[in-house]
Amino acid sequence: MEDSQQFDLLRYLSNAVEVVEKKPTEAIFAANAAVLGAKVGYTIS
């Protein structure tokens, strides 16, 4: 995994963690999408 992709993933997951308090269900879907995207090799923006 490239550094830029890893940074984007970590940043996205950090945002998802903050959202958990407000919208847990949406955050869970977002986290799942982030993980799947990382496995496929997409950059999360």
Image (spheres, grey):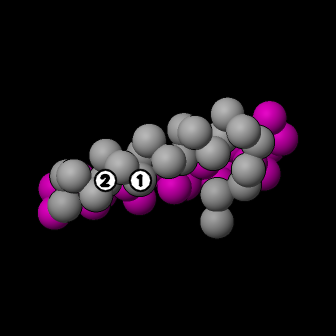
Q: Which residues are magenta?
A: 1-22
What is the secondary structure assignment of the residue under circle 1? Answer: helix
Residue 10 seen in this snapshot: no
Disc on res. 27 = 2
Q: How many residues crowd around disc 2 within 10 Å: few (fewer than 14), some, or many (20 or more)?
A: some
Q: Residue at x 64, y 57 (%)?
A: 44
Circles 1 and 2, Cβ within 8 Å, touching? The answer is yes
Place residue 26 in its image quadrant: bottom left
Place residue 22 in its image quadrant: bottom left
Provide residue 38's location: percent of width, then percent of height.
66, 40
Q: Residue at x 80, y 35 (%)?
A: 1
Q: Tag 2: residue type?
A: Ala
Q: Tag 1: residue type?
A: Ala
- Total number of numbered discs in the rendering: 2
Provide residue 28's location: percent of width, then percent of height.
31, 46
What is the secondary structure assignment of the residue under circle 2? Answer: helix
Q: CA distance from mark 1 to mark 2?
A: 5 Å
- Magenta span: predominant SS is helix
Residue denoted by label 1:
30
Locate residue 1 relative to residue 35 in the image: left or right: right
